[in-house]
Protein backbone atom coordinates (compact mmCIF):
# COMPACT_ATOMS: atom_id res chain seq x y z
CA UNK A 1 0.00 0.00 0.00
CA UNK A 2 1.37 3.39 -1.05
CA UNK A 3 0.08 6.81 -0.06
CA UNK A 4 -0.15 9.97 -2.13
CA UNK A 5 1.65 13.24 -1.48
CA UNK A 6 -1.69 14.80 -0.50
CA UNK A 7 -2.26 12.16 2.14
CA UNK A 8 1.24 12.78 3.48
CA UNK A 9 0.52 16.52 3.67
CA UNK A 10 -2.77 15.88 5.48
CA UNK A 11 -1.09 13.53 7.96
CA UNK A 12 1.56 16.20 8.57
CA UNK A 13 -1.10 18.86 9.21
CA UNK A 14 -3.02 16.48 11.49
CA UNK A 15 0.16 15.70 13.43
CA UNK A 16 0.88 19.44 13.80
CA UNK A 17 -2.63 20.07 15.15
CA UNK A 18 -2.48 17.14 17.58
CA UNK A 19 0.99 17.97 18.86
CA UNK A 20 0.05 21.61 19.41
CA UNK A 21 -2.39 20.35 22.04
CA UNK A 22 0.58 20.07 24.42
CA UNK A 23 0.84 23.86 24.37
CA UNK A 24 -2.88 24.59 24.12
CA UNK A 25 -3.63 22.34 27.08
CA UNK A 26 -6.11 20.12 25.27
CA UNK A 27 -6.06 16.33 24.86
CA UNK A 28 -5.33 16.12 21.14
CA UNK A 29 -1.89 14.58 21.64
CA UNK A 30 -3.24 11.17 22.63
CA UNK A 31 -2.49 7.94 20.78
CA UNK A 32 -6.15 7.09 20.11
CA UNK A 33 -7.01 10.59 18.87
CA UNK A 34 -3.94 10.76 16.61
CA UNK A 35 -4.58 7.28 15.21
CA UNK A 36 -8.23 8.13 14.53
CA UNK A 37 -7.28 11.06 12.28
CA UNK A 38 -4.54 9.11 10.51
CA UNK A 39 -7.01 6.29 9.83
CA UNK A 40 -9.50 8.72 8.29
CA UNK A 41 -6.82 10.22 6.05
CA UNK A 42 -5.30 6.90 4.94
CA UNK A 43 -8.66 5.14 4.46
CA UNK A 44 -8.53 2.41 7.12
CA UNK A 45 -10.32 3.70 10.20
CA UNK A 46 -10.95 0.26 11.73
CA UNK A 47 -7.29 -0.76 11.86
CA UNK A 48 -6.28 2.69 13.07
CA UNK A 49 -8.76 2.68 15.96
CA UNK A 50 -7.75 -0.84 17.02
CA UNK A 51 -4.10 0.19 17.09
CA UNK A 52 -4.90 3.51 18.76
CA UNK A 53 -6.86 1.78 21.53
CA UNK A 54 -3.96 -0.63 22.13
CA UNK A 55 -1.46 2.22 22.30
CA UNK A 56 -3.75 4.33 24.49
CA UNK A 57 -3.90 1.59 27.13
CA UNK A 58 -0.11 1.69 27.34
CA UNK A 59 0.25 5.47 27.33
CA UNK A 60 -2.32 5.92 30.08
CA UNK A 61 0.52 4.82 32.34
CA UNK A 62 3.51 6.02 30.33
CA UNK A 63 2.15 9.55 30.61
CA UNK A 64 3.09 9.49 34.29
CA UNK A 65 6.59 10.91 34.57
CA UNK A 66 8.36 9.82 37.77
CA UNK A 67 10.02 12.82 39.41
CA UNK A 68 11.23 15.35 36.86
CA UNK A 69 11.66 12.90 33.99
CA UNK A 70 9.94 13.37 30.64
CA UNK A 71 7.67 10.43 29.79
CA UNK A 72 7.50 8.83 26.32
CA UNK A 73 5.34 10.82 23.92
CA UNK A 74 2.40 9.20 22.07
CA UNK A 75 3.00 11.23 18.88
CA UNK A 76 5.58 8.71 17.63
CA UNK A 77 3.46 5.55 17.90
CA UNK A 78 0.32 7.52 17.05
CA UNK A 79 1.75 8.41 13.63
CA UNK A 80 4.35 5.76 12.80
CA UNK A 81 2.59 2.85 14.52
CA UNK A 82 -0.73 3.61 12.84
CA UNK A 83 0.93 3.85 9.42
CA UNK A 84 2.66 0.51 10.05
CA UNK A 85 -0.58 -1.17 11.16
CA UNK A 86 -2.49 0.12 8.14
CA UNK A 87 0.13 -0.51 5.45
CA UNK A 88 1.18 -4.00 6.57
CA UNK A 89 -1.65 -6.54 6.70
CA UNK A 90 0.04 -9.22 8.82
CA UNK A 91 1.43 -6.83 11.42
CA UNK A 92 -0.46 -7.07 14.71
CA UNK A 93 -1.27 -3.93 16.76
CA UNK A 94 1.04 -5.16 19.52
CA UNK A 95 3.99 -5.58 17.15
CA UNK A 96 3.30 -2.19 15.54
CA UNK A 97 3.30 -0.58 18.98
CA UNK A 98 6.60 -2.22 19.92
CA UNK A 99 8.28 -1.26 16.64
CA UNK A 100 7.10 2.34 16.85
CA UNK A 101 7.86 2.78 20.55
CA UNK A 102 11.44 4.09 19.96
CA UNK A 103 9.85 7.13 18.32
CA UNK A 104 7.96 7.76 21.56
CA UNK A 105 11.33 8.04 23.30
CA UNK A 106 12.89 10.27 20.61
CA UNK A 107 10.10 12.87 20.63
CA UNK A 108 10.75 14.06 24.24
CA UNK A 109 14.33 14.87 23.26
CA UNK A 110 12.99 17.06 20.45
CA UNK A 111 10.59 18.73 22.89
CA UNK A 112 13.48 19.53 25.24
CA UNK A 113 15.51 20.89 22.31
CA UNK A 114 12.66 23.19 21.21
CA UNK A 115 12.21 24.48 24.75
CA UNK A 116 15.95 25.06 25.01
CA UNK A 117 16.33 27.11 21.83
CA UNK A 118 13.30 29.20 22.81
CA UNK A 119 14.44 29.78 26.39
CA UNK A 120 15.61 33.32 25.59
CA UNK A 121 12.47 34.34 23.69
CA UNK A 122 10.65 35.39 26.87
CA UNK A 123 13.09 38.22 27.57
CA UNK A 124 13.00 39.34 23.94
CA UNK A 125 9.19 39.24 23.95
CA UNK A 126 9.13 41.32 27.14
CA UNK A 127 11.38 43.95 25.52
CA UNK A 128 9.16 43.97 22.41
CA UNK A 129 5.99 44.71 24.38
CA UNK A 130 7.74 47.46 26.35
CA UNK A 131 8.75 49.03 23.03
CA UNK A 132 5.15 48.81 21.80
CA UNK A 133 5.94 46.22 19.11
CA UNK A 134 2.89 44.06 19.71
CA UNK A 135 3.10 42.00 16.53
CA UNK A 136 6.68 41.06 17.33
CA UNK A 137 5.63 40.20 20.89
CA UNK A 138 2.80 37.98 19.64
CA UNK A 139 5.15 36.15 17.30
CA UNK A 140 7.87 35.69 19.91
CA UNK A 141 5.46 34.49 22.58
CA UNK A 142 4.32 31.69 20.26
CA UNK A 143 7.70 30.50 18.97
CA UNK A 144 7.51 27.31 21.05
CA UNK A 145 4.09 26.52 19.59
CA UNK A 146 5.36 27.14 16.07
CA UNK A 147 8.37 24.90 16.74
CA UNK A 148 6.13 22.10 17.96
CA UNK A 149 3.85 22.37 14.94
CA UNK A 150 6.73 22.52 12.45
CA UNK A 151 8.41 19.46 13.93
CA UNK A 152 5.15 17.47 14.03
CA UNK A 153 4.31 18.39 10.43
CA UNK A 154 7.73 17.25 9.18
CA UNK A 155 7.50 14.10 11.29
CA UNK A 156 4.03 13.16 10.00
CA UNK A 157 4.88 13.98 6.40
CA UNK A 158 8.18 12.05 6.46
CA UNK A 159 6.62 9.02 8.15
CA UNK A 160 3.87 8.78 5.52
CA UNK A 161 6.28 9.26 2.64
CA UNK A 162 8.71 6.62 3.97
CA UNK A 163 6.12 3.83 4.14
CA UNK A 164 7.99 1.73 1.58
CA UNK A 165 11.17 1.95 3.68
CA UNK A 166 9.22 0.93 6.79
CA UNK A 167 7.79 -2.08 4.91
CA UNK A 168 11.23 -3.11 3.74
CA UNK A 169 12.52 -2.89 7.30
CA UNK A 170 9.66 -5.04 8.62
CA UNK A 171 10.22 -7.71 5.97
CA UNK A 172 13.80 -8.36 7.03
CA UNK A 173 12.73 -9.09 10.62
CA UNK A 174 12.60 -12.89 11.17
CA UNK A 175 9.30 -14.44 12.20
CA UNK A 176 10.53 -15.60 15.61
CA UNK A 177 11.55 -12.03 16.48
CA UNK A 178 8.25 -10.69 15.17
CA UNK A 179 6.42 -13.13 17.45
CA UNK A 180 8.45 -11.85 20.38
CA UNK A 181 7.68 -8.24 19.46
CA UNK A 182 3.98 -9.10 19.32
CA UNK A 183 4.11 -10.56 22.83
CA UNK A 184 6.06 -7.54 24.09
CA UNK A 185 3.51 -5.20 22.53
CA UNK A 186 0.73 -7.08 24.28
CA UNK A 187 2.51 -6.56 27.60
CA UNK A 188 2.93 -2.79 27.18
CA UNK A 189 -0.69 -1.98 28.20
CA UNK A 190 -0.18 -4.06 31.34
CA UNK A 191 3.02 -2.15 32.09
CA UNK A 192 1.11 1.09 31.56
CA UNK A 193 -1.55 0.11 34.08
CA UNK A 194 1.14 -1.03 36.52
CA UNK A 195 2.72 2.43 36.33
CA UNK A 196 -0.65 4.01 37.09
CA UNK A 197 -1.18 1.72 40.07
CA UNK A 198 2.30 2.44 41.40
CA UNK A 199 1.40 6.12 41.78
CA UNK A 200 -2.32 5.91 42.61
CA UNK A 201 -2.95 2.66 44.47
CA UNK A 202 -4.16 2.84 48.07
CA UNK A 203 -5.05 0.03 50.43
CA UNK A 204 -8.77 0.87 50.21
CA UNK A 205 -8.65 0.33 46.43
CA UNK A 206 -7.12 -3.16 46.62
CA UNK A 207 -10.54 -4.97 46.85
CA UNK A 208 -11.68 -3.23 43.64
CA UNK A 209 -8.46 -4.27 41.88
CA UNK A 210 -8.92 -7.90 42.95
CA UNK A 211 -12.58 -7.81 41.86
CA UNK A 212 -11.58 -6.47 38.45
CA UNK A 213 -9.00 -9.21 38.03
CA UNK A 214 -11.55 -11.91 38.94
CA UNK A 215 -14.11 -10.46 36.51
CA UNK A 216 -11.64 -10.51 33.61
CA UNK A 217 -9.55 -13.62 34.32
CA UNK A 218 -12.20 -16.02 35.66
CA UNK A 219 -15.59 -14.66 34.60
CA UNK A 220 -14.39 -13.61 31.11
CA UNK A 221 -16.28 -10.33 31.45
CA UNK A 222 -15.98 -7.94 28.46
CA UNK A 223 -14.64 -4.40 28.88
CA UNK A 224 -18.11 -2.80 28.81
CA UNK A 225 -19.31 -5.10 31.59
CA UNK A 226 -16.20 -4.31 33.62
CA UNK A 227 -16.89 -0.59 33.14
CA UNK A 228 -20.38 -1.06 34.60
CA UNK A 229 -18.90 -2.90 37.60
CA UNK A 230 -16.48 -0.01 38.12
CA UNK A 231 -19.34 2.50 37.86
CA UNK A 232 -21.30 0.58 40.53
CA UNK A 233 -18.30 0.65 42.88
CA UNK A 234 -17.74 4.36 42.21
CA UNK A 235 -21.39 5.25 42.94
CA UNK A 236 -21.33 3.07 46.06
CA UNK A 237 -18.22 4.80 47.40
CA UNK A 238 -19.62 8.22 46.55
CA UNK A 239 -22.97 7.77 48.27
CA UNK A 240 -21.48 5.99 51.29
CA UNK A 241 -18.90 8.73 51.68
CA UNK A 242 -21.58 11.39 51.42
CA UNK A 243 -23.72 9.59 54.02
CA UNK A 244 -20.76 9.27 56.40
CA UNK A 245 -20.00 12.96 56.02
CA UNK A 246 -23.60 13.93 56.81
CA UNK A 247 -23.65 11.64 59.85
CA UNK A 248 -20.42 13.18 61.14
CA UNK A 249 -21.79 16.68 60.71
CA UNK A 250 -25.00 15.80 62.53
CA UNK A 251 -23.12 14.15 65.38
CA UNK A 252 -20.80 17.13 65.68
CA UNK A 253 -23.77 19.50 65.84
CA UNK A 254 -25.40 17.49 68.62
CA UNK A 255 -22.20 17.41 70.68
CA UNK A 256 -21.85 21.14 70.34
CA UNK A 257 -25.43 21.65 71.54
CA UNK A 258 -24.87 19.58 74.69
CA UNK A 259 -21.69 21.48 75.56
CA UNK A 260 -23.46 24.82 75.22
CA UNK A 261 -26.21 23.63 77.55
CA UNK A 262 -28.98 24.13 75.01
Image (tube, rainbow, N blue to C red):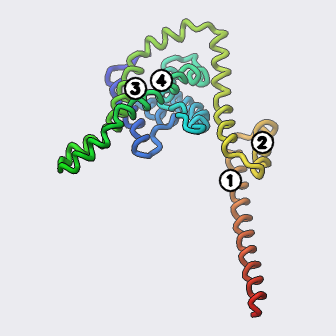
Query: Residue pushed farthest left?
Result: 132
Residue 14 visible: no
| Residue at x 68%, y 53% (from the top left corner) | 231
Q: Which of marks 4 and 1 is nearer the N terminus?
A: 4
Image quarter where the N terminus lies is top left
Q: Earlier in the sequence, mark 3 or mark 2?
A: 3
Image coords of residue 246 (percent x, y): 71, 73
Question: Could you give the CA–CA distance between mark 4 and mark 2, rounded to whole angstroms?
Answer: 34 Å
Q: Earlier in the sequence, mark 4 or mark 3?
A: 4
Question: Could you give the CA–CA distance between mark 3 and mark 2, rounded to whole angstroms?
Answer: 40 Å
Q: Quadrant of residue 144?
A: top left
| Residue at x 51%, y 27% (from the top left corner) | 104
Q: Name the residue under label 1.
A: 231
Task: Please give the label number shown on residue 80.
Answer: 4
| Residue at x 17%, y 50% (from the top left corner) | 132
Question: Could you give the CA–CA distance between mark 4 and mark 1, rounded to whole angstroms?
Answer: 35 Å
Task: Please give the label number shown on residue 156.
Answer: 3
Q: Nearer the viewer, residue 153 or 204?
A: 204
The label nearer to you, 4 versus 2, is 4
| Residue at x 66%, y 37% (from the top left corner) | 195
Q: How crowded is mark 1: few (under 14 residues within 10 Å), some or many (20 or more)?
A: few
Amino acid sequence: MTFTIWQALLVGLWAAFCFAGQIWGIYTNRALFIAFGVGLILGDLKTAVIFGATAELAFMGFGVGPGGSTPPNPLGPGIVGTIMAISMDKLSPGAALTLSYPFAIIVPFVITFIFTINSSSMETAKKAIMDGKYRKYKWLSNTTLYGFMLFAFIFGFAATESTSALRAFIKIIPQWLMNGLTVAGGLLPAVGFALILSTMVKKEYIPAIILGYVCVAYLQMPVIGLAFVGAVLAFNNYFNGKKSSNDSNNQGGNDGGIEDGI
